Amino acid sequence: MLPESALTQMYPVIMTPSHDGKYFHNYVLSLLNIVNTSAQNGWPLQVMMQRGESLITRARNNCVATFLENQEWTHLFWIDSDIGFSAEAFSPPAFWRIKTW
């Protein structure tokens, strides 16, 4: 398990590519909840929404390239634009359960 102090070193980015730039209502509400929860708790978080690429594989490759260019980001999360989720499912305390080898 990761120690709680490791959370201060994490800077995740959420990336969601979309062909036409449309994002479902439940996704947007979930994303707003995550951003709000992160801000209230002082957890760093970045969101990147890419649009205009018709091939999902190329869109994801572009997102990975952007992630690798930014040395501050430590974790990359793909979240599809058509799902909803709770902020608690994404919150850093959930990271405590990640095993390190």
Image (spheres, rainbow, N blue to C red):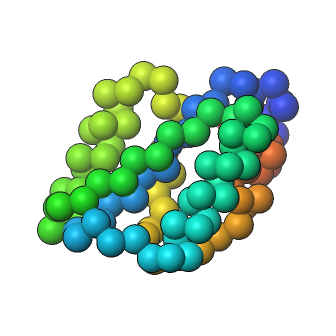
With respect to residue 28, does 75 lie above or below? Answer: above
Asked which quadrant contains residue 92, the reply is top right
With respect to residue 43, does 96 lie above or below? Answer: below
- Quadrant into which the N terminus falls: top right
Tell me what residue is drawn at x 62 percent, y 49 percent: 35
Tell me what residue is drawn at x 56 percent, y 76 percent: 26
Count of residue discs: 0
Percent x, y for residue 80? Answer: 44, 68
Q: Is residue 14 left or right of residue 62?
A: right
Tell me what residue is drawn at x 23 percent, y 70 percent: 20
Percent x, y for residue 21? Answer: 28, 66
Percent x, y for residue 60? Answer: 29, 55
- Quadrant into which the C terminus falls: top right
Asked whether residue 98 appears in the rendered view, the answer is no
With respect to residue 74, does 91 lie above or below? Answer: below
Asked whether residue 71 appears in the rendered view, the answer is yes
Percent x, y for residue 81? Answer: 43, 70
Q: Is residue 99 left or right of residue 22?
A: right
Tell me what residue is drawn at x 46 percent, y 57 percent: 78
45 or 28, nearer to the observer: 28
With respect to residue 71, does 90 lie above or below? Answer: below
